[in-house]
Amino acid sequence: MPVTLKDVAKKAGVSRSAVSRTFTEGASVSAKTRRKVEKAAAELGYSPNALASSLTTGRTKLIGLVSNNFHNPLFLEVFDLFTRLLQERGLRPLLVNLTDQTDPDATLQLLRQYSVDGVIVASSTLSPEFALAFQEARVPVVHSFGRIAASPRVNVVGIDNVECGRMAARTLIARGYKRIGFMGGPREASSTIDRRTGFTEVLKVTPGINVTESFATAYSFDAGRAEMLNLLKGEPAEAYFCGDDVLSIGALSAITGKGLSVPGDVGVIGLNDMDMARWENINLTTIRQPIRQIIDSSVELVVAMFDKPERPPEGRFFACEIVERGTLRPVKS
Amino acid sequence: MPVTLKDVAKKAGVSRSAVSRTFTEGASVSAKTRRKVEKAAAELGYSPNALASSLTTGRTKLIGLVSNNFHNPLFLEVFDLFTRLLQERGLRPLLVNLTDQTDPDATLQLLRQYSVDGVIVASSTLSPEFALAFQEARVPVVHSFGRIAASPRVNVVGIDNVECGRMAARTLIARGYKRIGFMGGPREASSTIDRRTGFTEVLKVTPGINVTESFATAYSFDAGRAEMLNLLKGEPAEAYFCGDDVLSIGALSAITGKGLSVPGDVGVIGLNDMDMARWENINLTTIRQPIRQIIDSSVELVVAMFDKPERPPEGRFFACEIVERGTLRPVKS
DNA sequence: GAAACCAATGCAACCGGTTGCAAAAATCCG
DNA sequence: CGGATTTTTGCAACCGGTTGCATTGGTTTC
């Protein structure tokens, strides 16, 4: 039923090759045949089958977009940007939701079956091994929001979480907080580990500071709220650096829910700067992750990979910046 | 470089057909050859090329997932569910972000080029014509979160927005509100129109009620906040039915930002029940849209379509329910 | 043991395109 | 105008699979 190359060729009175060539960038066709073919194609409503052509060209323009972050509101922005940027380059995102049930190997196999030109792993919690498996199967891959490494074994784009930890620490110190808390995300997540490292590194060498640590079970509102509720049972710190924004919002909810004020009784600084953080009834002071740059760079990198497969793995890391809003007390001047 | 059918056939010492058949459900192969083939395939790390096989079978297992709602947090949940459910059925979502720049016709053409087995249009703001174009191109299509219609021209799954409007109205009446406001989403969106219809229908026949109406420019936090700020310049109503949850949260932000209390001074009821609505520092009374059912049903319908293409278009609409939280005053007993 | 049957197999054509190559057509040039 | 050059064109093979059909081989039945 669908109209094929052959139909167009017959209608236009030319060979199949001629038709193929009129739809191929840079192929040699005379103006006259091109016109005939285009007319016939338009009349029949023909458009070439991308899958069939991929068979010979070896390019599908399909990009696997793999993520396990379908609950963090930040990732809606992430998906929005990825799809836009990929589309702009004529690439198509094949979305894979990596849940607890999905087997990592099966995902690799799946994406190979669809001959994706490349894969973007968008996740702050996945281990580098996941992306590495693609690399070893010679599928161009980029790990976005992955962990910084001096000489990464696989392309990785993200932020320097250790430095973010330091920034958070300096920010709290500048505001005169003395009893300071680190409320991390899941204990085993590399982002948690790195942020903690930078955070405590700075605080330890600062005199007169008392640091406490705790960890939420997930990067989620509920986990943040639960953990903060827990902390409030004892003597809370004066300010907390929370694992990320959604965790921070959970913590804020717990604090105000207990009748305490922010930043009067407890200060909070988050990380991400997701859209919601600027909402006036949240108004979260946080550290902005430049997701636009991360995503731009990821797409660029995956494209570079399939132009030059032997390209050595590269790490690209972007600086973050403090976004001052209302959940920390002001710097005393 | 990648290993193909032929390689496996040679290694196993059988014909290509034999290899193909061992990987085809229900094909006739003896246990002996199957064993040989599987051994060879495992050693070579072979897995069949889904795209090549689609050429003859006519099935790609690719589903176009088209949306223009990449800013409404509800849609993160929507994408999560869609991808999960599709994956469970062995289908692959090809994600299309329909922005202002993307041409609807180009999207149709694109998805045809990739021979998608079906298309799901997930959008509460797109016109039925968009989905209809796929239908006319004989591509199985379902419009999720679309507008109710007695005899739809295209498959549509969603909620009865008129009835939701009525529910909201009855809920406000039951709580003794007299001066009641409708704060809709974009004036031209069908969801806005329908909700308004049901809402005013009930309020008009109730004695002693004063209804006012206004419209936000988008289903977004900022638009909701701006519109409520606007309303608060004059004499606000006692309670508002807002276009959706994110709009409601914007409105809440404006109200509390002005030093007014919720529900003491102004009541708010939203629609959607997105995850955030239950967060304790938002705690929004709202109308739950059963997105799980909508998505289940959409997937089921699109699958049914490609098993039976001549299936007449069907509309499936689900009931919503009030979720009582803290932004309306209690029913007086 | 032969006839009848059924499952398993391989051949070859096909799905909808692309592309190297040689022949044909158009253009250039003296 | 004729030969040399360049451009355009069609043929046929190929991409990686699937499948109808005829053939083969193994079982069953009498």
Image (cartoon, coloured by chain):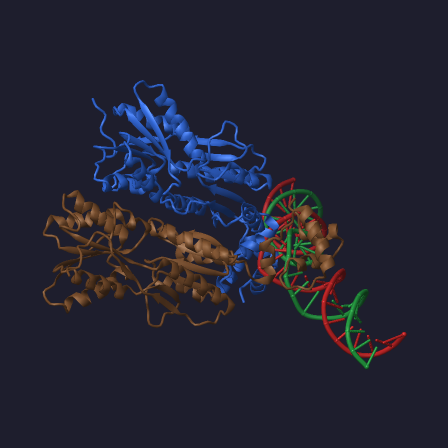
Chain colours: A blue, B brown, C red, D green
Q: Is residue A200 above or below residue A133?
A: above
Which x, y percent locates residue A195? 40, 30
Which x, y percent locates residue B233? 11, 48
Task: Using the image as rendered, state which of residue B203 and residue A101 is in the foreground.
Answer: A101
Which x, y percent locates residue B147? 32, 64
- Asked whether residue B106 appears in the rendered view, the answer is no
Q: Is residue B131 left or right of residue C21?
A: left
Quadrant holding the C terminus of chain B: bottom left
Task: Using the image as rendered, state which of residue A236 and residue A180 is in the foreground.
Answer: A236
Task: Using the image as rendered, state which of residue A240 and residue A281 is in the foreground.
Answer: A240
Q: Which residue is found at the position 53% from the left and 43% from the top?
A: A118
Quadrant holding the N terminus of chain B: top right
Q: Which residue is found at the position 45% from the left and 64% from the top?
A: B300
Q: Is residue A308 above or below residue A197?
A: below
Q: Which corner quadrant of the image does residue B25 belong to?
A: bottom right
Q: Is residue A178 left or right of residue B101?
A: left
Which x, y percent locates residue B56? 61, 61
Q: Is residue A117 left or right of residue A165?
A: right
